[in-house]
Image (cartoon, rainbow, N blue to C red):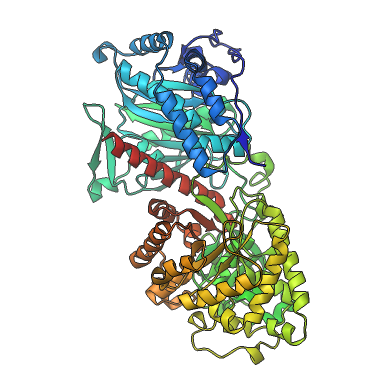
Amino acid sequence: MPETLTPSLPAAPAAPREGGRRDAAALTLRFDELRRDAVAVAGGKGANLGEMAAAGLPVPDGFVVTVGAFREFLTASGVAVRIEAMLDELDVDDTAALQSTAARIRELVLGTAVPDGVRAAVGAAYRGMGPAADRGEPFVAVRSSATVEDSTEFSFAGMFESFLNVRGEDDLIAKVRECWASAFGARVLYYRAKKRVPGEALIAVVVQRMVNSEKAGVLFTLNPATNDDSVVVIEAAFGLGEVVVAGQVTPDRYEVDKRTARLRTSQIGHKAFLLKRAATGSNERIELDDDAAGAPVLTSEEIASLGRLAARLESHYGVAQDAEWAIEAGSTYLVQTRPVTTAPAPPGDAEVEPGRILARGLAASPGTASGVVRNLASASAAHELQAGEILVTAATSPDWVPIMRRAAAIVTDAGGMTSHAAIVSRELGIPCIVGTKDGTRVLRSGQRVSVDAAKGLVLEGAAPAPSPERGTPGSVRTPAAAPVTATRVYLNLGDPGRIEEMAALNVDGVGLLRAEFLILETLEGRHPRLLLERNQGGEFIERMASQLERFATAFHPRPVMYRAMDFRSNEFRGLESGERFEPHEANPMIGYRGCARYVREPELFRLELQALRQVRARFDNLHLMLPFVRTGLEFEQCAALVRGSGLEPGHDFELWVMAEVPSVSYWLETYVRLGATGVSIGSNDLTQLVLGVDRDSELLAETFDERDGAVLAAIGAIIADAHRLGIPCSICGQAPSVYPEYARLLVDAGIDSISVTPDAVDRARANIAAAEQRLLLAHARAHRA
């Protein structure tokens, strides 16, 4: 069933119970008339600011345009009835309808006059807050404050409008109305439906004196990455805090001991520019030279002061806080605060005690582990690895996957961030270090070691067990409320052992279901040609269909994109009887694989297609993706095999091509004409072929870079061509999982979806949301200009 919204206006909200003003019908309320229980009247931000003011915390003066004023606007003008009609039975999964409805509601709200009573109340409150020097018209920040925002359960981060440097009553009224309109934005409507947010889209508006800050930023009263609640984390930049909140510069980062307010660690960022308020009220960008950009923002006294202020803030609320701060003329202010919404630290992420370093490599999959080394030369020695041991080997390939599942951590001599060991370890959630060069030489079986994969170190001896206070359910208040993004976030998957866990993640489906892992499970070490030779093709189809159905069931109705078998000849040769069936190739990476194999051995490809068709008879969310497509002729022959199996590409059944070979830029129009309905960029292989680099070579690890300008140009061209041809474009390489800045590049280029490893879902969603917000902000500024 489609997820819909059918709102109606509820009764008036309850009034504040303690200390605050009790007139729930008030159109405006000063901060000192509010307390934390006034969310129904003032929204999350407004109630928090009232609570902070009452606690004596340094909050700039201001007031709240209440939910009552919003209700008066909706009902007096008749807007409420018209909005209800538009939202009635809206299917938020219909992207076009969602965007159209949100735009129509925004136009309606912005085109409706504010009632005289509301306008008068807002004007009086505004004139009453400005000093004489401002002639009753101070610069103010105008921020939306929804009744379900900034809670520990729902964050709605970045979804509602905020405006800085607003001055004058007319401008203020216009910005209040824009905040009201943002209660019905496409992302808000989608988020409310998907998160099943109770209640209605009610919103208050905070009006607060602007601090013309010389320094500003954010602080957390715990480390949000590790849940370490003994520290305060402060991020700081010069000028206005917008550059930190929007991620426009790399801020300084300070970790302060919460108990003593002493500095523990600091990282000085490169603040390329600052924003300051010009006399006209607009923000002025000032470029900083290298010396100024690399200078520390905060003095030791300011760091200690913010540390003490953070401790006071958390002590008052009783839960960890995420606050914005600003410093003007030597005075420090707290602009807003909200509860920290953070997830538990993953198991095994304890600090590793420093010991003698035995090996160094690339941190490929985060986490820590201790155990006994098992040094294996080949997958044929799998029986020697006991569960919980540290697997050390030269490199891994698909036939190692069953072994890797038993390991507590994995260390390899060769490989980079996108090597087989790295990719599989991230999907399995196993700490992994690659590219040590001499790991197999210096790490001996039976030796007890500790692996700190976050730092790429193998240390002598066992680390102590994690502290029971850290990473336990009691140390975390609530799971994170993930931002909603227009760019879909998919999973890269293959391991059938974690389906239910993966399906519970906040993802839009599976963008890459690798056939190789499933086929290894099905074949039980046998070469697929051996099954044909023994007339066991039917067994393969049944067992493969059973595996595929598990994924289709778990993720239904979300799409699951199955990438057909893409073994290389050297990987196939490791299977039973593989030497009989596989050629010896000098460079298997660009050899007998992908569509070329389907064309020459169609009987193997037909087994996969029959398994796929069998599952699609019950689940229509399973689709097909063809890997390593080189030419139009190859695709035409493969598409004919697909149709011959009874699978017809179209709206119901998607047939995608992987964009791994640079020739895709030439052939994509032909692929679409022949039936391709989408394209997914495999950035790993594409990077290898654009740059001519073997990604598994530790000697060339520095040269393999998916951020290279030539690679980015190729990706941008593929996205543009896909949209010109009217098909969606995704990416399922490792870059979006590894490099945060990649999300911005992809969003700017117009990518439709990004598929990442399970460990990177939350990070990717947050990075995508930030990129989309920056893009919207840029468009808004261009429109205003």
- Between residue 265 and residue 782, name the one nearer to us: 782
- Between residue 693 and residue 607, name the one nearer to us: 607
Image height of 25 relative to 5, above or below:
above
Res. 298 in view: no
Res. 516 in view: yes
Asked where in the image residue 642 lies, by quadrant, the reply is bottom right
Find residue 224 and report its horizontal and vertical position in percent: 53, 43
Find residue 760 and report its horizontal and vertical position in percent: 54, 54
Find residue 655 and report its horizontal and vertical position in percent: 56, 64
Question: What is the quadrant of the N terminus in the image?
Answer: top right
Please name the residue shown 41% across and 45% down the image. 253
Q: Is residue 400 left or right of residue 133?
A: right
Q: Is residue 424 left or right of residue 726?
A: right
Asked where in the image residue 208 lies, by quadrant, the reply is top left
Q: Is residue 522 left or right of residue 80?
A: right
Total marks placed: 0
- Between residue 85 and residue 403, name the one nearer to us: 85
Question: What is the quadrant of the C terminus in the image?
Answer: top left
Please name the residue shown 57% across and 77% down the image. 395
Please name the residue shown 69% across and 66% down the image. 613
Please name the residue shown 47% across and 11% down the image. 27
Find residue 244 and report its horizontal and vertical position in percent: 38, 40
Image height of 85 relative to 430, above or below:
above
